[in-house]
Amino acid sequence: MEDEMNLGELLKEIAEENQTRKILEILDRCQTLEEAREKVRALLDK
């Protein structure tokens, strides 16, 4: 049972890291802060 909880926690951590990477990539590619905000909002609305 403890292994299942650890696996779930690991998957959650990986998902959060991937989301952070996506957001950082958006910030790097956008010309303006407003453009970045729109793209991050769109990403979170998926």
Image: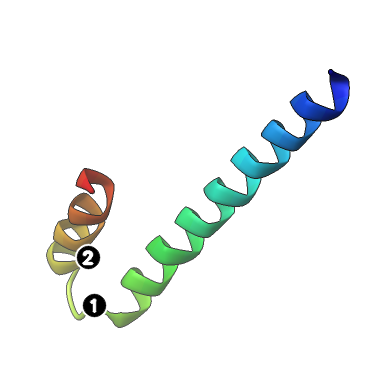
Say what amino acid the circle numbered 1 marks: Cys
Percent coordinates x, y for residue 10 in the rendering: 72, 41
Quadrant for the N terminus in the image? top right
Residue at image coords 55%, 49%? 15
Q: Secondary structure at mark 1?
A: loop
Q: Earlier in the sequence, mark 1 or mark 2?
A: 1
Percent coordinates x, y for residue 11 in the rendering: 65, 43
In screen coordinates, is 6 left or right of 41? Answer: right
Cα separation, mark 1 vs mark 2, equals 6 Å
In screen coordinates, is 17 left or right of 27? Answer: right
Residue at image coords 14%, 58%? 38
Name above or below for residue 29 compared with residue 43: below
Q: Residues within 10 Å of mark 1 (few under 14, many from 20)?
A: few
Name above or below for residue 14 compared with residue 24: above
Q: Which residue is mark 1?
A: 30
Say what amino acid the circle numbered 2 marks: Ala
Residue at image coords 53%, 58%? 18
Percent coordinates x, y for residue 26 in the rendering: 32, 71
In screen coordinates, is 27 left or right of 21? Answer: left
Q: Residues within 10 Å of mark 2 (few under 14, many from 20)?
A: some
Residue 21: mark in rendering? none
Q: Secondary structure at mark 2?
A: helix
Residue 36: mark in rendering? 2
Name above or below for residue 41 compared with residue 24: above
